[in-house]
Image (cartoon, grey):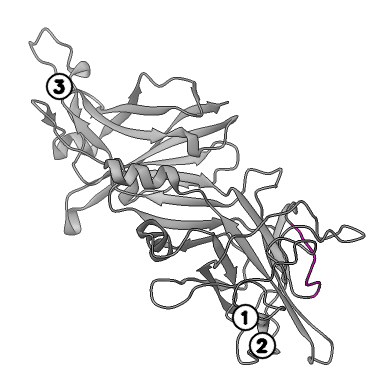
Amino acid sequence: MHYFTFAEKDTTLYEASSSLNAGLDEILEIRKDISVDGESVSVSRVLLKFDLGYISSSIVSGNITNPKFYLNLFDANSTNLATSQSLYAYPVSGSWIMGDGRSYDNPITTEGCSWKFVDGATGGTLWPGTISSSGGQWTEGEGYVASHSIGYKTSDVRMDVTNVVNRWLEGAVPNDGFLVKRSGSVGNLNSGSDEGNSSRLGTLSFFSTDTHTKYPPTLETVWDDSQWSEGSLSPLTSANLEDMVIYMKGLRPEYKEKSKVKFRLVGRERFPEKTFSTTPSNLTVKYLPSGSSYYSIKDAETHDVIVPFGTGSKLSCDSTGNYFNLWLDGYQPERYYTLEFRVQSGSGVDQTNQFFDEGFTFKVSQ
């Protein structure tokens, strides 16, 4: 399954204006601004925090097992990017106040966290254990950093942050959120790092929690929740799989956003053989290949892939037939989603991959 948690708060820290708060900006920026002569460099860094309470309790209860975690940041027209660079995410050291400022406020808003303060100019609390011009404080070392490579073509970021999230879940460090940045030191004093040197790397822009689009940051939890117990059902044979159709059973047009739903589907041969049975052949349920049948979910309007085919989207089976579960509280409400399926069978040169896009659509409502 793929479960999505939305950030509870985020902001950008700007070195150029060390007390500026941008907690309500719709865009998060990882900037690197260099003067014409190359002598002056100023950068920005991003803070995001996700509530892990539900994920933690679900792991303890056994509803989530062996998860992977991904930080999703959606591109908001990044500009002038270098041909290659890397982005890093660290666990923040110390709590911080998001604030209600914007980067374009005039005069600037200084209440809430900034490059210099964790709480604002009035509180005056510096980032812990650092010099006053810090740009945040973070924990680093093995298991405390995640990275993602970026090219010159703008794209969304899906960063594997499993190690960092596991440190929080284990209680090794408190969950004060991620600090996302290019390589660089506290205070941006290391001239040999991507932040501190004179290389022009461009501006990375991502939608924030305050965006009016469907692209706020998310923490994606992925695990294999598939179960297989087909009972007395028979499998679809290799001959059946070569020419088959898939349909949904009981698909409703709309589901509430807090729902946990079991979706059922049936695969059958396109032209069932005639038999003398009192049960029509086209009503006989057979099951799809175990471990190699998947679902995918796309946004019906934008066609963005929300759930890709993979380990976290394997079909399950019980004595009634194939199914999969979705926790819809991680989906954007008031949007339509389409379901697609992939069935892999055979092996080697005889392996086949079939894709089924039959227009199965549902809405998540508030």
Which amino acid type is marked by label 2? Leu
Q: For the residue carrying disc 2, how many other residues have a C-alpha within 10 Å: few (<14), some (14-19), or many (20+)?
A: some
The image shows residue 48 at horizontal and vertical percentages of 59, 58
Could you tell which of marks 3 and 1 lies nearer the N-terminus? 1
Residue 255 in magenta stretch: no
Q: Which mark is residue 351?
A: none
- Relative placement, left or right, of 139 versus 48 is left
Tag in front: 3 or 1: 1
Magenta region, main secondary structure: loop
Boundaries of the magenta span: 16-22
- Image: 198 above or below 141: below
Which residue is identified by label 3?
A: 273
For the residues labelled 2 and 1, say whether their Cβ atoms are less than 8 Å apart.
yes
- The residue nearer to you, when weighing 358 against 47, is 47
Inspect this view and state whether residue 48 appears: yes
Residue linked to disc 1: 186
Q: Is 20 included in the stretch rendered in magenta?
A: yes
Quadrant of the drawing holding the N terminus: top left
Mark before the other along the chain sequence, 2 or 3: 2
SS of the residue under disc 1 = helix
Residue for point 37% across, 50% down: 222
Residue at which label 2 appears = 189
Toward which corner of the image does residue 270 lie, by quadrant? top left
Q: Residue at x 71, y 89 (%)?
A: 198
